[in-house]
Amino acid sequence: MAQALIRFLSAQHVERDGSDHRFIAGCFGIFGHGNLTGVGQALAQNPELMTYYQARNEQAMVHAAAGFAKMRNRLQIFACTTSIGPGATNMITGAAAATTNRIPVLLLPGDVFASRRPDPVLQQLETPSRGDISVNDTFIPVSRYFDRIQRPEQLVPAALAAMRVLTSQAETGAVTLALPQDVQTEAFDYPAKFFDRRSWHIARPLPDTGAIDRATAVIRAARNPLIVAGGGVIYSEASEALSKLVEHTRIPVAETQAGKGSVPFDHPGCLGAIGTTGTLAANRIAAKADVVIGVGTRYTDFTTASHTAFQNPGVDFINVNIAEFDSHKLGGLALTGDARATLEALDDRLSGWNADEGYVREYEQLRTDWDVEVTRLYNLAHQPLPAQSEVVGAVNELSGPRDVVVCAAGSLPGDLHKLWRTRDSKGYHVEYGYSTMGYEIAGGLGVKLADPSREVYVMVGDGSYLMMAQEIVTSIQEHVKLTIILVDNEGFASIGGLSRSKGSGGFGTRYRYREDGSLGDDAAHRHGKGLPVDLALNAQGFGSHVFRASNIEELRDALVAAKKIDRTVVIYIPVDRYEAVPDYDGWWEVPVAEVADSGEVKKAREEHVRGLERRRWHL
């Protein structure tokens, strides 16, 4: 059965716009007794069918697979195989991140014996009320498709169903085929046609003509229209179509995290990031927009600033999305279809119409003002430690137009969303749907595997680094060079800042020795003794070339020198934990205790209640 699975997967192709290529690029795996003699034996027996990649951590290999698939616009993926038990459940976080972000990954965890003859086996979870459950049932809520192959012939319908979901632009995410270890090794006379080359067509469906006509009429009547570009713009390869529409109509564009790079930062209509981590330009225009055209966005709370971003009482939404689930959000006019095809249709119907000239002058001035603000934050010359915004600026300015920045969690994604000057539609790769600490290095590995011609800059804080740094070893083994900027702010800086803003003083977020029996707030530990941890030395021990920078000038020197090194480079730089990039009319709903002893918490509660007054129902 396992041999049949590998043969089937190697024969699957996808085709879009006349370009046809193999769908499964390879298989990450860590072997144990639950997959060694099944999937492992199949990969070893026929290495020409599928390339095997060794990983160090099961969660990390799913992140690498997701990074690869995202970089390939979901048109090519990796499979990931593990043993039953902790190897399997280690993949749960990766599966959740992939499904949340609508990124296809194929997970092949081993499972307990279908025959149940040797029950209970090593690593088997026993449930007194059910005999057919295993730890792999935890994949069900985080998978777009799940099946357990209890008999070898069940592989045929299950494999086809898995491919349907993996290649669906609307339904895609993690797909899990749980493989009992005995069934993997059982023989079956599979139909020869099962192994024939199969090409899955990725269509570009258009919304209903009447819906497009209604949307056109709404836009033509608008005085302050705004486009919100999400990840669907990039996956659909619709950046050129979006740029043309903006140029023809002069409707400005604001970008979500996944949609950043939909248009270049210096495009006349680009207002940059929107929402909680948005720019002043985008958020000011969003507040007055009377028509919001969302393209390929899920409208998360960071995009809508917890439903406070769009303040116009008469605002209408037009939602272009391949997924019907998303196109109907916020009570909008649903244009369910491919982003590129739909934008082209709207561009054609809006021929000759332009946004009001006064409105254009207003957002152009806001764009200019924001560019000045970014330059200021890039050049703070903060002492004694640099500000994180200066680090972002140095990396941005010394990276090439096609280079890719990768990040996922902490305070860096917010700073990057606001400040990174994106020049290429694939140059910005931040996993913020699940905001997974530990994604960064593994995701960067996947990005580099997807396009070796680009330099990949992984920006990671010390908190995320400590959670999952070991895929540096995989990058060394595979000769896949990453440039990792390791920003040390002595703990969980993002949550520390949030904690302080909510009156809790950064409780439990700074890396310091325990003092007086407590790991208390930042104030109590500001001058406490630091931990004797050397992250740069750790990175060197993994096999990377390490630079230590104590200021921005040394960081710049290290970035230049790193370009000449042929293996993974880690540049370590400490930053000021407290020098944060301001908020720009953005808000995020994080509840604060209604009753507390602390005066600071009470004050934060009052501010929270004032923020709640800005929330809007969009129906």
Image (spheres, rainbow, N blue to C red):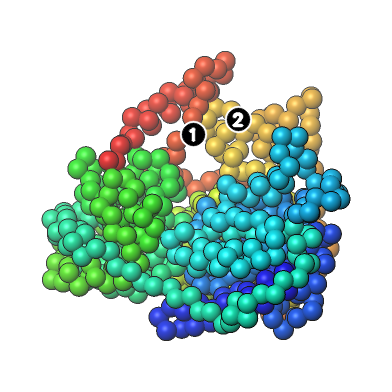
Quarter-of-image position of residue 220: bottom left
Nearer to us of marks 1 and 2 is 1
Q: Position of residue 66 (x, y in %)?
A: 59, 63
Looking at the picture, tell me which residue is in the foreground, 445 or 173.
173
Residue 13 visible to an observer of this rendering: yes
Looking at the picture, tell me which residue is in the foreground, 432 or 390.
432
Q: Amino acid at mark 1?
A: Val
* Label 2 environment density (alpha carbons within 10 Å; few <14, some 14–19, many ≥20): many
Number of marks: 2
Q: Position of residue 130 (x, y in %)?
A: 71, 39
For the N terminus, the quadrant is bottom right
The kind of secondary structure element at disc 2 is loop
Q: Position of residue 433 (x, y in %)?
A: 51, 52
Q: Which residue is mark 2?
A: 505
Estimate the spatial distance between the alpha carbons at disc 1 and disc 2, rounded to whole Å: 15 Å
Q: Residue at x 83, y 60 (%)?
A: 32
Q: Position of residue 81 (x, y in %)?
A: 72, 63
Q: Which residue is mark 1?
A: 590
